[in-house]
């Protein structure tokens, strides 16, 4: 199922103008564009938009959000755990405010101003932002990725995405082959080169870590296995061979 820009705006509360801007800067490209020029967004694009909105809640600038989400080492599962913590804090605050209103309606006014306090939420947000910055912002790979991707145009992102999909499709076509087969190992080399050419210098150590995440993180697995079930596992096993593990 694909949604138009207008439908996405209506469903998410993000304006059409903002969605157009996100596309222009390469932050949220549509899943595909019709011959008539209409942008269409699929489930993966909507999931990315959700991550964008979460990170905006933490006051990350758009350029950093794009670099974080496009970094192959981005741990979506860990990020979602931190999002959950913030939401639980917000819910607890709202519950306190609701109880305060209900007591006032019952004729039991309380001089309770602590319920309005957002310091715990703000502290958690600052801590999350600090952890995210320490995780991505201080790494040489992150800085290199941010510097490179900041110069990419919409056309650049489309080309990079197409090239990455081609490699995923090639891995999917090799399912059933041994991970150490020459053809599969050549694909690992292509994937490593793809990351190095477009994001940061992908060492064997980084590549090995990425390979493990392809099956350890359900979101990575789902994203890769959309090209064919078992593709993520083949990539992980092939990367292990490639990196001599």
Image (cartoon, helix red, strand yellow):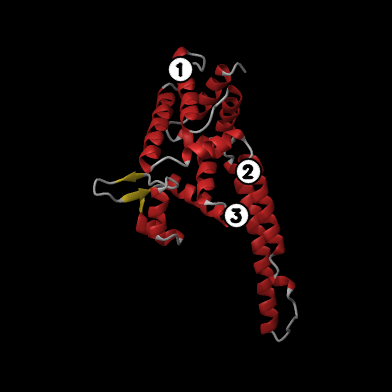
Q: Is residue 71 visible?
A: no
Residue beneath label 3, please?
58
Where residue 119 sits, quadrant-wise, is bottom right
Residue beneath label 1, please?
186
Q: Is residue 116 visible?
A: yes
Residue beneath label 2, please?
78
CB under 8 Å between discs 2 and 1: no
Disc 1 secondary structure class: helix
Disc 3 secondary structure class: loop
- Measure the C-alpha gap from mark 2 to mark 1: 31 Å
Q: Residue at x 63, y 53 (%)?
A: 84
- Measure the C-alpha gap from mark 3 to mark 2: 15 Å
- Which part of the image, by quadrant, shows the C terminus? top right
Q: Vertical placement of 153 versus 39: above or below?
A: above
**Label 2 crowd (10 A; few <14 / some 14-19 / many >=20):** few
Residue located farthest toward the top when viewing the structure as drawn: 182
Residue 170: x and y in percent read: 40, 24
Q: Is residue 38 left or right of residue 126?
A: left
Q: Earlier in the sequence, mark 3 or mark 2?
A: 3
Q: Is residue 126 left or right of residue 202?
A: right
Q: Decide which of 192, 180 is in the foreground and name it.
A: 192
Q: Earlier in the sequence, mark 3 or mark 1?
A: 3
Residue 41: x and y in percent read: 38, 49
Q: Earlier in the sequence, mark 2 or mark 1?
A: 2
Q: Vertical placement of 82 versus 116: above or below?
A: above
């Amino acid at each position: 199922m694909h949604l138009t820009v207008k439908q996405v705006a209506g469903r998410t509360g993000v304006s059409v103008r903002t969605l157009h801007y996100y596309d222009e800067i390469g932050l949220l490209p549509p899943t595909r564009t019709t011959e008539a020029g209409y942008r269409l967004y699929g489930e993966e694009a909507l999931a990315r938009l959700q991550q964008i909105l979460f990170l905006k809640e933490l006051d990350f600038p758009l350029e950093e959000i794009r670099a974080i989400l496009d970094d192959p080492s981005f741990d979506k599962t860990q990020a979602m755990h931190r999002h959950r913590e913030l939401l639980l804090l917000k819910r607890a605050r709202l519950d306190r405010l609701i109880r305060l209103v209900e007591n006032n309606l019952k004729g039991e006014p309380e001089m309770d101003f602590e319920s309005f306090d957002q310091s715990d939420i703000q502290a958690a947000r600052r801590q999350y932002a600090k952890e995210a910055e320490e995780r991505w912002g201080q790494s040489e790979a992150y800085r290199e990725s941010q510097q490179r991707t900041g110069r990419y145009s919409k056309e650049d992102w489309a080309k990079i995405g197409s090239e990455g999909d081609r490699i995923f499709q090639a891995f999917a076509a090799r399912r059933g082959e041994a991970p150490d087969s020459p053809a599969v190992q050549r694909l690992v080399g292509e994937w490593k080169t793809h990351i190095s050419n477009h994001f940061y210098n992908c060492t064997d150590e980084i590549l090995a870590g990425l390979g493990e995440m392809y099956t350890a993180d359900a979101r990575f697995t789902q994203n890769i296995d959309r090209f064919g079930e078992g593709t993520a596992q083949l990539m992980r096993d092939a990367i292990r061979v490639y990196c001599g593990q």
